[in-house]
């Protein structure tokens, strides 16, 4: 009973944290532009959070192993609150950057919540427990962008920052009063010590391909996320050419306040559509598509003989849809056409992400699960750092359509590699069946 109550508390913590994060995603570009950022600087503004989180996550994990999950959650929530308050009152671009650095450094809420789930669930219950975190991600990315669009249009970065800070304050109360300490002497470690051998996982045929695929895919998708608000401003929300000035990191756009307000609403609406479709597809369609490819086999010694034969073809379809969406984005004739195009991206992402995660988990030997999952997550984090910065640079130097054309090429290359993955998974399964 106490365990179920703790799981509900963890779900609430994760949902509030991810709604706060989701509120900011489509709005960062709008406020970067407001404070004189070039598209490249906007990309850096998006990337700096992931960079700081990648640096801080192992430290937060070690602290939670040593001092407990609850203190680290409280510290993370205080840091997020301070970052959001600074975002609310930021009136210059450096302050906006500082707010994202603070939030990134202290952004250990979700990873620590995952450690709590690992503490209070038995191994055979772990997938169900982690599914709670996955559901929180879905809910956060459905509600967050829509709320961000409304709040941004109504009260600008002040309203967005204070609302997100309020969510962090609720999380503080939730953790302080309702979440007991869950760390025990035999709890699974939240650190990434097994990452010392992470490079070796690239020699595993299926896993190595998946690590490369998630990097390619995340770079391409993050290019779109990091530049989309500026693209919306320059392509669809200006009656004429948007003024360019020599601004922060060269050639900043300077639309008026009414255009920025409209950009907040429209970018929020589009990202909300992405969140809703992704949640629907991951919640039902993925399982049906995967089931259509047959039942998995069972390998020896914990190795997944034949497993993943269902997921790989579905991932190929996801790569194809995403490449098509990115290729169509620069040629959409009007704002209304962006909805079906973003729909393609949403469905593609919802097919690729869980299928690649499943393939990695299924093909990682039991004794190397930590190293494999650590390498896979690090590859995704690296993509979220490279993608926005590269997209902003391409936007600034080559024009508004460049991030999407290059992103489509990257995803298409990933699709070809994913096709080879289908064959590799089948060979892996056949080999495991012969050895069992």
Image (cartoon, grey):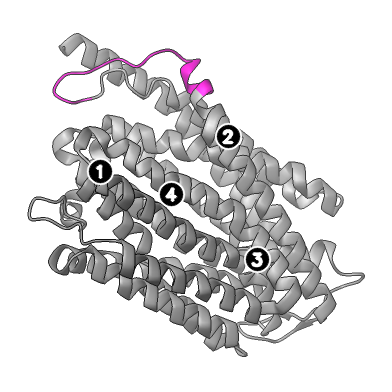
Identified at 42% across, 67% down, the residue is: 171
In front of the other: 366 or 21: 21
Neighbours of disc 2 within 10 Å: few (<14), some (14-19), many (20+): some
* Alpha-carbon span between mark 2 and mark 3: 23 Å
* Alpha-carbon span between mark 1 and mark 2: 26 Å
Answer left or right for 101 relative to 320.
left
SS at badge 2: helix
Camera-nearest label, 3 or 4: 3
Label number found at residue 372 = 1
Q: Earlier in the sequence, mark 3 or mark 4?
A: 3
SS at badge 4: helix
Residue bearing mark 3: 148
Residue bearing mark 2: 281
* Alpha-carbon span between mark 1 and mark 3: 35 Å
Indicate whether 62 appears above or below 342.
Answer: below
In the image, farthest residue toward the left? 185
Whether residue 201 is visible here, answered yes or no, is yes
* Alpha-carbon span between mark 4 and mark 2: 22 Å
SS at badge 1: helix
Identified at 30% across, 52% down, the residue is: 6
Camera-nearest label, 1 or 4: 1
In front of the other: 72 or 374: 72
Q: Earlier in the sequence, mark 1 or mark 4?
A: 4
């Amino acid at each position: 009973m106490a365990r179920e109550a703790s799981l509900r508390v963890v779900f609430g913590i994760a949902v509030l944290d991810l709604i706060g994060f989701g509120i900011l995603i489509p709005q960062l570009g709008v406020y970067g532009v407001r404070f004189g950022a070039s598209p490249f600087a906007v990309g850096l503004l998006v990337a700096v959070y992931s960079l700081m989180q990648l640096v801080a996550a192992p430290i937060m994990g070690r602290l939670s192993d040593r001092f407990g999950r609850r203190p680290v959650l409280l510290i993370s929530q205080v840091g997020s609150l301070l970052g959001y308050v600074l975002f609310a009152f930021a009136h210059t671009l450096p302050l906006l950057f500082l707010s994202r650095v603070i939030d990134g450094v202290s952004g250990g809420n979700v990873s620590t919540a995952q450690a709590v789930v690992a503490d209070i669930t038995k191994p055979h219950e772990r997938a169900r427990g982690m599914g709670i975190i996955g559901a929180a991600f879905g809910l956060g990315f459905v509600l967050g962008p829509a709320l961000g669009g409304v709040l941004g249009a109504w009260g600008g970065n002040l309203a967005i920052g204070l609302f997100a800070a309020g969510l962090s304050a609720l999380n503080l109360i939730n953790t302080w009063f309702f979440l007991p300490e869950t760390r025990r002497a035999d709890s699974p470690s939240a650190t990434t010590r097994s990452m010392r051998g992470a490079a070796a996982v690239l020699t595993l045929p299926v896993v190595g391909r998946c690590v490369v695929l998630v990097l390619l895919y995340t770079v391409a998708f993050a290019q779109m996320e990091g530049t989309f608000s500026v693209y919306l401003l320059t392509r669809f929300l200006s009656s004429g050419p948007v003024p360019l000035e020599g601004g922060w990191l060269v050639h900043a756009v300077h639309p008026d306040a009414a255009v920025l307000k409209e950009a907040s609403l429209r970018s929020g609406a589009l990202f909300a559509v992405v969140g809703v479709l992704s949640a629907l597809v991951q919640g039902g369609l993925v399982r049906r598509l995967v089931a259509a490819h047959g039942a998995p086999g069972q390998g020896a010694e914990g190795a997944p003989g034949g497993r993943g034969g269902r997921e790989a073809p579905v991932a190929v379809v996801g790569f194809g849809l995403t490449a098509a969406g990115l290729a169509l984005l620069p040629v959409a004739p009007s704002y209304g056409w962006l909805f079906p195009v973003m729909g393609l991206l949403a469905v593609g992402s919802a097919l690729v992400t869980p299928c690649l995660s499943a393939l990695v988990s299924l093909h990682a030997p039991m004794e190397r699960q930590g190293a494999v999952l650590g390498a896979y997550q690090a590859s995704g984090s690296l993509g979220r750092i490279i993608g926005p910065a590269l997209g902003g640079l391409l936007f600034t130097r080559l024009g508004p359509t460049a991030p999407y054309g290059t992103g489509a090429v990257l995803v298409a290359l990933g699709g070809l590699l994913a096709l080879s993955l289908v064959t590799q998974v089948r060979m892996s399964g056949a080999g495991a069946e012969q050895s069992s």
